[in-house]
Image: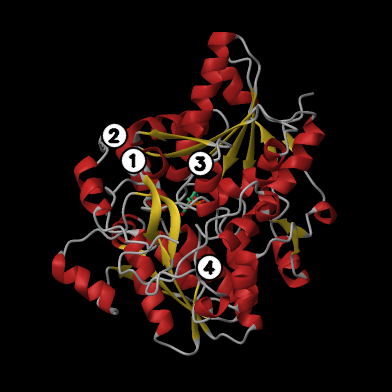
Amino acid sequence: METRRFFLEQKDMPTHWYNIQADLPEPLPPMLHPVTKEPLTPPDLAPLFPMELIMQEVSQERYIDIPEEVQEIYRTWRPTVLHRAYELEKALDTPAKIFYKYEGTSQGGSHKPNTAVAQAYYNKKEGVKRLTTETGAGQWGSSLSFGCMLFGLELKVYMVRISYDQKPYRRIMMETWGATCVPSPSPDTKAGRDMLEEDPDCPGSLGLAISEAVEDAVMREDTHYALGSVVNHVLLHQTIIGQETMMQMEMAGYYPDIIVGCIGGGSNFAGMYLPFVKDKISGKKPDLRIINVEPESCPTVTKGLYAYDYGDVAMMAPIAKMFTLGHRFIPPPVHAGGLRYHGMAPIICHLHRLGFVEAVAVPQIATFEAGVQFARTEGIISAPETNHAIRVTIDEALKCKETGESKVILLAHSGHGHFDMAAYEAYLSGNLIDYAYPEDKVKEALKSLPEIPAT
Ligand SMILES: Cc1ncc(COP(=O)(O)O)c(C=O)c1O
């Protein structure tokens, strides 16, 4: 009998998060204040985040304890299962061994609750009453709604307009858990009103929705802001994925040769690979390949500049050293709403610069082709974001077929696509389109990078 699924007991769930900062060969470049352009200090971030999250952001400790209350909630869906994709392997007729860690069984349907629950917990502990946030595809907004519901916090979500229109059911999920959700740009903030004046039909972007959520949070004493990706503490919370997977791969008797995942801001995939990249940095697994997959229409790492840039359109969020397409870049309206961000997690960018991870960009139609093949073999209908990772997993498995190598490929499967039927319908009816790399728009947006004084 083939073992198709690898389970961990609840008692085996990791009780700490892994902090890569302790093992980086060179420290991360500091984040800068959006106004002074000086390195950020913890008090600068206090209007936005609770102090425990701010300290996690800069911590150099290798392991950070997961609070008992957060562990208890994690155990309502964790540990998640590691699957062996036998049916996909058979259909591809590949000697490769494909594994996938499936995060779609959380209440929100993706990896996002791993950090949503933790962030809601720390805010509640600090006495915060209300949170604001942005959401792209709605996965993050719905997960934070779930987290806020658990801890009795009020939540307002600014949802990128194009996704708000494409995915009404995500909004209804947020409302069911008790949150308020408005399309961004909205008339509720100055950042939103300015954009609506410039372009009343603006489809929105994550960078703009962040501006609205940050503006709302800093205007009110009782409110903090929560971010669903990009920053260090969010990646930290997601490392529970990789730590569980390491144990499960050991149960399966393999160590991956290639790890593949999609990157929007970078949280799900970094959460998977940071515990593994440690082995690459230490020289224990020098040949391990880690492939970050992004959309061709928003090719942040593959075509962006490595530079200091604002995290949002209105230049209110911290300035980070990252690959960027320019904070004013509005990506084309691809269905993978969670991958439409101009920047990228500084940790991922740093590891890419140091040569520990690679990146590729894939076109939209090919991702759905892969997603449908996955659904017709493994049965799971995946989020459009995840389909990017599935595309490259299949491509790598097909390369193994050509060379005859039986590599072990580990796919970070970030979530289901049950609310993305409109996108699948567009693909199945032949109406899905590919967007070329928007070179002119990127060039234009890169003109607005901040000038950073030399240190
Ligand atoms: C299912 C899914 N996967 C991936 C992403 C991309 O985000 P990140 O790169 O932070 O994991 C999102 C974002 O919304 C998502 O919903």
Disc 3 residue type (three-letter): Arg
**Which numbered dot is residue 429?**
2
The image quarter containing residue 109 is bottom right
Mark 2 and mark 1: Cα distance apart in space: 6 Å
| Residue ID at (66%, 52%) | 20
Residue 415 visible in the displayed image: no
Residues at marks 2 and 1 touching, judged by CB atoms closer than 8 Å: yes
Closer to the camera in the image, 278 or 417: 278
**Which numbered dot is residue 223?**
none
Q: Earlier in the sequence, mark 3 or mark 1?
A: 3
Q: From the top left corner, tell me how far across and down residue 329 is, in percent.
A: 27, 54
Q: Earlier in the sequence, mark 4 or mark 2?
A: 4
| Residue ID at (27%, 47%) | 332
In this rendering, is residue 76 above or below 344? below
Q: From the top left corner, tell me how far across and down residue 68 is, in percent.
A: 78, 70
Q: Nearer the viewer, mark 3 or mark 1?
A: 3
Q: Earlier in the sequence, mark 3 or mark 2?
A: 3
In this rendering, is residue 82 above or below 162? above
Mark 3 and mark 1: Cα distance apart in space: 39 Å
Q: Which residue is mark 3?
A: 353
Disc 1 residue type (three-letter): Glu
Q: Which residue is mark 4?
A: 144
Q: Image quadrant for the N terminus?
A: top right
Closer to the camera in the image, 132 or 321: 321
Colour scheme shown = secondary structure
**Which numbered dot is residue 425?**
1
Assign a secondary structure to mark 2: loop
The image quarter containing residue 209 is bottom left
Q: Image quadrant for the C terminus?
A: bottom left
Mark 4 and mark 2: Cα distance apart in space: 33 Å
Q: Nearer the viewer, mark 4 or mark 2?
A: 4
